[in-house]
Amino acid sequence: MADAPAAGDRAPAFNLADQKGDKLRLSSFKGRKVLVYFYPKADTPGCTTQSCGLRDIADDIGDTVIIGISPDLPPKLAKFDEKHGLGFTLLSDPEHATAEAYGVWGEKSMYGKKYMGIVRSAFLIDEQGKVAAAWPKISPKDTPKNLLRALAGD
């Protein structure tokens, strides 16, 4: 697993398809803060908790953009968005190149089996495209709390 970018580092660029199939670049949000969070799989319990928690604070974060990234394909992301009324961008990274660039593609273990996958993590990117805060191995419930604290300057 590559090292995750730390506070002060330039955020790795990406150009990925969203839940509608449209390509989206990180650079298109220059001038705005962006929360980029990586989750393993749409519509699983932890990922739903994390995404719905972010949906629930969306009105409290001003102009900050929320972007979720997983290996899921756009049609699955669209169903996840519709089912839970997320209302923010979900990006498809099936080749996990972006996850690797952010250092969140790594070895995991479940029921004694080892496999490669997304290590749930989140990054707050500032208006100039630099990482303002990084939360590797974050819990689903802590993602919205950490974002609110970071935006409040705590």
Image (cartoon, helix red, strand yellow):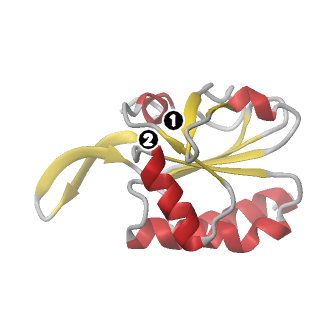
Residue 125 position within the rendered picture, expressed as x and y whole percent measured from the top left: 73, 40
The quadrant holding residue 2 is top left
Instruction: Choose the circle earlier in sequence order: 2 or 1.
Output: 1
Outermost residue toward the left in this view: 112
Residue 55 position within the rendered picture, expressed as x and y whole percent measured from the top left: 68, 68
- Above or below for 104 versus 24: below
The residue under the point 80% across, 39% down is 126
Disc 2 crowd rating (10 Å Cα; few below 14, some 14-19, many 20+) is many
Left or right for 22, reference 150: left
Task: Look at the numbered disc 1 and give the secondary structure of its residue.
Answer: loop
Left or right for 123, reference 138: right
**Which quarter of the rendering shows the C terminus?**
bottom right
Q: Which residue is mark 1?
A: 4
At label 2, the amino acid type is: Val
Distance Cα–Cα, label 2 vs label 1:
7 Å
**Which quarter of the rendering shows the N terminus?**
top left
Q: Visible in this render: residue 141?
A: no
The residue under the point 49% across, 31% down is 98
Q: Are marks 2 and 1 in contact (CB under 8 Å)?
A: yes
- Above or below for 112 versus 46: above
Q: Visible in this render: residue 84?
A: yes
